Amino acid sequence: MRINLNIPLLLLFCLQALGQSNPLMVKDSVAQMAWVESQYQKMTLEERVGQLFMVSVASNQGKSATDRVKNLVKEQGLGGVIFSVGGPVQQAELTNAYQSVAKVPLLIGSDAEWGMAMRLDSTYAFPWNMTLGAIQDSTLVEKVGYQIGKHAKRVGVHINFAPDLDVNNNPQNPIIGNRSFGEDPKNVAQKGRAFVRGMERAGVLTSGKHFPGHGDTATDSHKSLPIITSSVERLDTLELYPFKKTMEAGLSSIMVAHLDVPALESREGHPSTLSKAIVTDVLQKRMGFEGLVITDALNMKAVSQFAPQGEVELQAFLAGNDLLLMPENVLKAKTKFMEAYNNGIITEERLSTSVKKILMAKYKAGLNNYRPVAIENLVEDLNSVENDVIYEEAMEAAITVVKNNFSLMPIKKLDNKKIAYVHFGDDEGSTFLEALNKYQKVTPIAAKDIAEYKERLKEFNLVIIGFHKSNDNPWKGHTFSKNELFWLEEISRLRTSNTILSVFTKPYALLDVLNFDTIDGVVMGYQNSEIAQKKVAEVIFGAIGASGKLPVSAHAEFPVGTGLEVEPIQRLGYSIPERVGMSSELLAEVDTLVNDALDSLMFPGAQVLIARRGKVIYDKNFGKPTYQSNDSITSESIYDLASLTKILSTLPMIMKMEEEGKIALNDTFKDLMPEYADTELKDVTVLKALSHYGRLPSWIAFYLDTLTKDRKPSNEFYRENPSEAFPYKVAEHLYLTRSYKDSIYDKIGRQSLKSNRYRYSDVGYYVFKEYIEKTYQRPIDELVDEFLYRPLGLQRTLFNPLKKFPKEAIVPSEEDDYYRYQTVQGYVHDMGAAMQGGVGGHAGLFSTANEVAKIMQMYLQGGYYGGERFFNARTVKRFNTCYFCNKNVRRGVGFDKPQLDEKGPTCGCVSRKSFGHSGFTGTYTWADPEEEIVYVFLSNRTYPSATNTLLIKSGLRTRIQQAIYDSIIN
C-alpha cells in the first residue's frame, strides 16, 4: 500500500545526519573556495547551467560523433564527459582535445568498477566486488581501490563511478550480482569503505551507487523501473547501511538509482532519481550527505520514459541532484533549465549550490592545476606487473572452501592418489588442469554420458570437477546445465572416489545443486581468470591456504559467511617476482644470459627455475633438445641430472638411514663393505667420503677395460640382447655381463689412497649405493622413489626414464663416439652408472627443473614438504655443515657449499648456509636458506659432444645466480 511520505519517527531516528565533514572539501579549503568562487563569477548563466551536465562519448566512435561532443563542450560549457568503451590512448587523446576547448576544465568520468577494463581495451581487469566481498582483510580491498584509482588518474579520469554499495540479497538480480560486495550490509559497508579509502588516496573521486539500493530486485533498470518493496525499517538496516558507513570514509559522491521505492516516495511509479523525498530529504538532509549527488544515466529506460527529453533532467535537478549524467538531449535540457530559472522555479541559490559543489569536486580532483594526459607509455603504465601482484593477493584471500569432508583439502599422501579432472561449464579450464598437474599427475576425463564417465572414472580415487563459466564480464551466465547437475550427482556418488567441486563463477551457481551429501569438498574460485584457476589449484594442494568466506548465501547448506580455514602445507606455489621481493625487470637479465649462451652454442636447450619464499617466480624453457630438432624445450622435458643424483637420490637415503641408526657418519668403508677390511680404503669414513676429503680417486673409467683394441664394446662383456647372464642395459642393443659388477667393486677395493687434500670423487657413491641396497634388500631407485619421489608427487624424477616415457620426452645428452656409438637419449650419460644398468649412486637420475626444485625446497624447509616430514630439521642442518673448512675443504656432507676463496661453485653472492651441486651434463641447483631461494639450471651442454666446455668456461650458471641475487629488491 502506498503511503504519504511523512517520514516516521523510526526513520527520523535511524537516518540522523551523521555529522561527517564535507567530502569535497580539501585541506586548503580557503584556496579551494576562492577558486570555486572565481570560476563561478566568471561564468554566464548558460555556462553555469552547462556545468550540471555530463555527457557520454565512446573513444571508439567515429569522428563525427566525437566532434559533436567537442562542440557541446565548447559551445554549451559542459561540466563533464563520461567515457564509455574504447581504448586508453584514444580516450586520452580525446580528453586532451576536449579539455583544450573547455573554459572550465572538464570533470572526466568513467564506470570502472573493476578497473578501466570495464570500458577500455588494453587495460587491466581487477576482481569483481563479489570476489572482493569474500576477503577477510579489507586492506587488500583498499589496495585494489588504490590501483584502480591510479589507472583512472593515469588515463585522465577524475571521478570513477564506484564502488557499488548495493546489498545483493536477490540471487535473481540481473544487473548487480557480481558487482556487489555481497548480501551482508556490514560486509558491504566494510569493503566499500576500504575501496573508497584506496581510490581517494590515489586522487580520484569516488561515487557510491546505486542509492537507495538496487540489490533486492529482479529487474534491470536499463530496461524498466525496478520496484523495491522493502519497508522503511528494512531499508534503514539493510540497503542504506553501506551508504551511511561509506560516507564516513570520505565518499565524494553518491549516484542515485532509477528505482520505485514506495516506502520513501508516495507517488506510484515515481523514479527515485526524480524524487525530492529521496534525494533531498533522505540523502542530504537526514543522512547529512554534503558530497556530490549524481543521477544514474538519464538515458536508461527506467527514467527516460517517465517524461519528455529536457523535463527528466529538470525534475532530477529539482529533486536535489547536482550532476546530471548522460542526458538524452543537452540542448533541450538547457532550454528547460533557462526557462525554469527565468520563471523562478530554479533559484539562484539552488543553482549555485550544485554548480559550486561541482567546482569543489573539480578542485579536489586537481583541475585547478590541469595538465593534459601524457600519452607516452600510457598502455605500459596501465599494465604494470603491480596489477598481477594485487590481483593475486586479492584472489588468494578470496578463495573460499565451503565444504571439506575428511580434511580432504589440502591433498596429502600423494603417493596413493590417482586423480582425475572433469571439466564442466562453457569456458576454458586448461589453466586449472595445468596448475593441478604441477603437483601430481591429474588426468582429464571427458565423456558423452554418465555411463561413460563412470566407466572411465572407476580407476581413480579422487575426482576434481572444475566448473568454468565465462570471465568476460560479471553478467555472464553462471548456471549448471541439466546434464551437468545430473553428472555431478552421479559422479559424486561413486564409491571408488572422493569428489572436489571447484567453482569458477559466482556462488549462486550452487543454488541449483540439489544437495551436497556426496560431494566431499567444495571450493569457490569466484571467477574463471587464469590467476583464479592457478590459485584454486594451489589451495587444493596446499601451496597456499584458504580464508575467504561466502559474501552471499550460496545454498541452504552454505549461508552467507560460510568459509572453512584451510592451512597451507608448504608445497611450492607459483607466482611472480614482485610477490617475493624481486624485480621482473632485473630478472630479465637471466633471459639475456641464457639466450646469449644459446647463440654461443654452449648447449642446445635449457630449463631455468627460480623460487623464493616458497613460490616459483621464474620457470622458463629455452632452445631445443638438439640443434637440429623441430621441437622446443618445455617444462616437461626430462634431463639427465648427472651428479645432482648424489644429493637428490643417494644422499636422502643416507640421511634417512642415519636417522634410523642404520649408518653413522663415523662408520668406515670396512663397516659398510667388510670385503674392504684389508684394503687401503678400510678406514675412509662416511663423513670424509661425503665431504670429498676421503683421499679417494676422482673417478674410475671402468668402461675402458671392456673395450676392444679398436675401442669398441667387447663381445666378452656385451651382448645385443638381454639374458640372465647379460642383464645390465647400457644403451640400445648393448647389455653388460652380470659378472662385471664384482669387477667394479673389486677395482674400487684395489685403489690406493690419494694425497690428503680436497678431491671431488664419485667413487664413494658406488660404495654407498651397494650398502643401501644390501641393507634394504631392494634397488636404490625403488627405495628413493617410494621414500621421496612419490610422496612429493614427482612424476618425471626417475632412473631409466625410457621405462615410463617415450624417447621424445627425454633430452639427449651426447652423440657417443667412444663407448656406446649411438645417440645417448633416455640412457644415463655417465659410463659408470650406465654399466650398473642405468642406476648409479653418483649418476643416473633424470628429472625436470620443477621437480628438482621440490626436493631442494624440502631441504630448504628443514626436511618438511607437503604435510610430510622426510627428515628431522637437525639432520638437514648436520648434513649441510662444512666439517673440514679448516682444511680448505668447502664441502658439506654430500652437499656442495660456497667457495672458501675467490673461485668456486657459486657467484660468491650466496650465504654460507647455502648448498647445492652441479652436474657434468650441464646441470646445477642451489638453495639458500637465508634468502629462501632455490635455483635450478638444467641443460645438455654435452650434446652433441662432451668436449664442448663453453658452459663451464663461461661460468654461465653462476652468472645467472648473480643476476638472481641482483634482482632482489626486498
Image: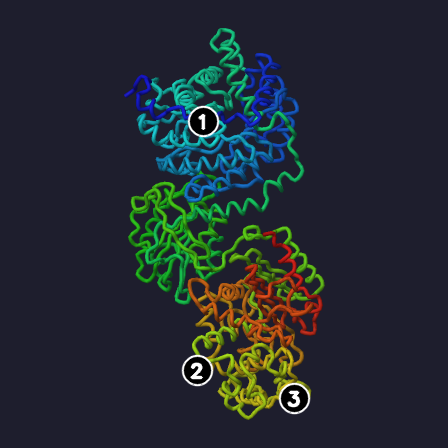
Between 84 and 35, the residue placed more toward the observer is: 35
Does dot 2 land on a helix, a strand or a loop? Answer: loop
Q: Are marks 3 and 2 in contact (CB under 8 Å)?
A: no
Q: How is the image coloured?
A: rainbow
Of badges 3 and 2, the one in the foreground is: 2
Q: Position of residue 587 (x, y in %)?
A: 63, 54
Q: Is residue 801 visible?
A: no
* Kind of element beneath mark 1: loop
- The quadrant in which residue 897 appears is bottom right
Q: Which mark is residue 812?
A: none
Whether residue 165 is visible: yes
Res 708 label: 3
Q: Quadrant of residue 708?
A: bottom right
Q: Nearer the viewer, mark 2 or mark 1?
A: 1
Q: Upstream in the sequence, badge 3 or badge 2? A: 3
Pinpoint residue 29: horizontal percent, then vertical percent: 56, 24
Q: Is 318 above or below relative to 625?
A: above
Q: Residues within 10 Å of mark 3 (few under 14, many from 20)?
A: few
Above or below, 469 against 96 in this view is below
Q: Furthest residue to the top?
A: 343
* Residue denoted by label 1: 20
User: Is the N terminus in the top left, top right, bottom left or bottom right quadrant?
Assistant: top left
Residue that badge 2 annotates? 777
Pick the residue in front: 787 or 797. 787
CA gap between label 3 and label 1 equals 96 Å
